[in-house]
Amino acid sequence: MALTQIVNPIICPTPTVPRRFTAISPFKTLNPQFSRYAPQALSRRLFLPSVSSIWDAITGGGDSNPREAIAAVRSGMQLFKKGDVSGSVTEFDRAIVLDPRQKAYLWQRGLSLYYLDRFEAGAEQFRLDVAQNPNDTEESIWCFLCEARLHGIDVARKQFLEVGRDSRPVMREAYNLFKNGGDPEKLVNDFSSGQASEIFYASLYAGLYYEAEGKSENAKFHITAACESPYGQRSDDYMASLAKVHCLCRNWSSGFV
């Protein structure tokens, strides 16, 4: 006859959590202003302010100033949306001085650097960010755009940053276009009857592809179309603002920003 041993469970007291930790939640502190995507396509970069706050709570803060750094990032984003690209970089750089951990996540800075023709620094920024977020299709493309201006399309394509699968069909097709080459018109046509955001993104990235090829008139046609689309006109998406800034920087129109 087998003996059955009954073991009484050991109940441990619940550890006491200091109050300064209980108020910190990486989900409650998300700020949609830091996303360039629609709410359903959140990027891991959204969690940076929360990560900084948690780390400071554990370590006592160190020499960094995460709250001021986040405020500087927000200020830089607002300046960019208003067309002050140089001012936006000043704020993004100030954020890095205040909290050096921010640099690896500042995709906004990379976009601003592109429009200041600081392509080497822009490519470096996007490569840093992709190292932290290896599933970001758009940063891979923007790194390509910077490096194409530095070295030409062929060299940029040879060192193209491969990333994970984007949840958005339009960005999967855009990614393949930049990575492998192809016809930007196909990208636009494939999503011409899609959702408003898909029409916008197809036009924007078709125009950016043409710009990389040096075809400014084609680029102008598609990027102004992105600006004038319903999504480009009404969305709070950071990339909708970027399309308007692009037109402003290229002197295609001064009425978008």
Image: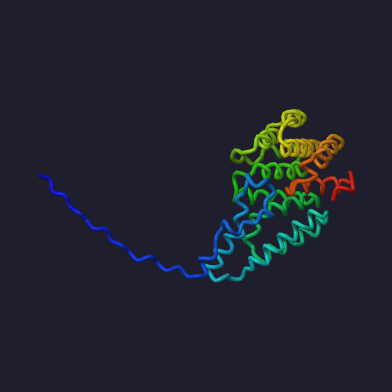
Q: Nearer the viewer, residue 149 or 50?
A: 50
Figure check: 195 above or below 107: above
In this rendering, position of residue 150 left or right of residue 62: right
Residue at 68%, 46% in the rendered image: 37
Which quadrant of the structure image shows residue 66? bottom right
Residue farthest along the left direction in this orientation: 1
Count the numbered circles shown. Answer: 0
In this rendering, position of residue 37 left or right of residue 150: left
Q: Nearer the viewer, residue 119 or 200?
A: 200
Quadrant of image for the N terminus: top left
Q: Which percent across, then down, holds residue 27?
A: 57, 56
Residue at 72%, 64% in the rendered image: 94
Q: Which percent across, then down, holds residue 86?
A: 81, 57
Figure check: 68 above or below 175: below
Q: Which percent across, then down, holds residue 14?
A: 38, 65
In this rendering, position of residue 117 left or right of residue 97: right
Figure check: 118 above or below 168: below
Residue at 68%, 49% in the rendered image: 126
Colour pattern:
rainbow
Which quadrant of the structure image shows residue 138? top right
Which quadrant of the structure image shows residue 184? top right
